[in-house]
Amino acid sequence: MAEPILSVRDLHTEFVANEGIIRAVDGVSFDVFQGRTLGVVGESGCGKSVTARSILGIVERPGRVTGGQIILRPADGPPVDLLKLPAKAMRDIRGPEIALVFQEPMASFSQYYTIGNQIMEGIRLHLGLSRRAARDRAIELLDMVGVPQPSRRVDEYPFQLSGGLRQRVMIAMALSCDPRVLIADEPTTALDVTTQAQILDLLRDLQQKQGLALILITHDMGVIAEMAHDVAVMYLGRAVETGPVGEIFSAPRHPYTRALLRSIPTVLAKPRTRLPTIEGSIPHPSNRPTGCAYHPRCLEIIDERCRAQEPPETGAATTRIRCFLHGGAA
């Protein structure tokens, strides 16, 4: 396999709060390859969105990236560590190299400007096109993502569009400068199932046509099974299991991954039976358990070892896991 376009190594992001230091991202590592999709999955509060914002350098205060490496391999140049770039150089990365589809389009758009103006802003900033050429490019992008009557819609405001159309416009905005890496943060949240399928089909088609490296953040294991080539399962700021989607789904090794898969409804389940659930809830990052972060909810806990020691990351080159049940440590 070729070198990854994006490599995240031991990433740490913290927030300073009244109750102390909150470690929102606590040592995440993964690779993203051209033409492939990395699915980042986990419950709400496990650090998925903060990881995406850390990659782009847009973590809001009082948060800050405190350690690790984010290595980008541009098409025409040596690899660069995004964490070492000055602010101006980082602005040049956002858009032409890495783009983000935000989780909630209605909150991400300005309601005072037309969608055309908001798409054109990035095009003129990074590509240096005239206003007329940028408008033509915006119409072309709206047509590419399936917005009907793009020459009319380009002059409409976000509140005039449905949720599905706003999501398509958000994707068009992210693609406006031809990025090589696209991060989609919960792109199907709050959409009906038909629109969800359309958005996922759109992302898949765009990836095949443009060779995008896609990071798909979601809590839906069904979306991961359909879309992803590789999977990173996150829990409380850490990737507890990573590997190819086939291996993760056919032979999950971490108890948390197995619990997530058990909670998915299947056609083989007996009618009118209660779905398995994961007991308890994910702890707040400011109240992190000692030892393995998952041990208070784990059904396969190993005596005091899981309560007292943090499991190291072990495994082969393609599949990595943080659990004492594997790697000869049990």
Image: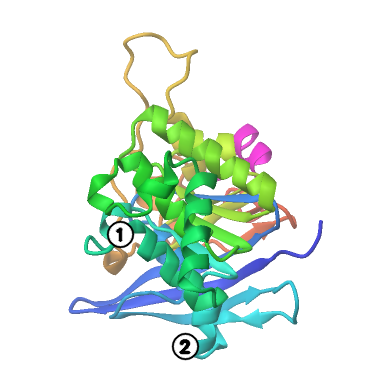
Of the numbered discs in the image, which one, if any, rests on residue 87? 2
Quadrant of the image occupied by residue 317: bottom right
* Segment tinted magenta in the rendering: 244-254
Three-letter residue code for mark 1: Thr
Residue under label 1: 114
Task: State the image coordinates of residue 97 (x, y, percent, origin top left).
Answer: 60, 70
Task: State the image coordinates of residue 33 (x, y, percent, origin top left).
Answer: 69, 58
Which class describes the residues within 10 Å of circle 1: few (<14), some (14-19), or many (20+)? some
Residue 249 is a magenta residue = yes
Quadrant the N terminus occupies: bottom right
Instruction: Specify how the rendered protein is coloured.
Output: rainbow
Task: State the image coordinates of residue 187 (x, y, percent, origin top left).
Answer: 42, 47
The residue under the point 77% across, 65% down is 3
The image shows residue 129, relative to residue 137, as above or below, that is below
The residue under the point 39% across, 57% down is 102
Q: How far is the residue under mark 2 from the one under mark 1?
A: 28 Å
Q: Is residue 179 left or right of residue 14?
A: right
Quadrant of the image occupied by residue 69: bottom right
The image shows residue 94, relative to residue 181, as above or below, that is below
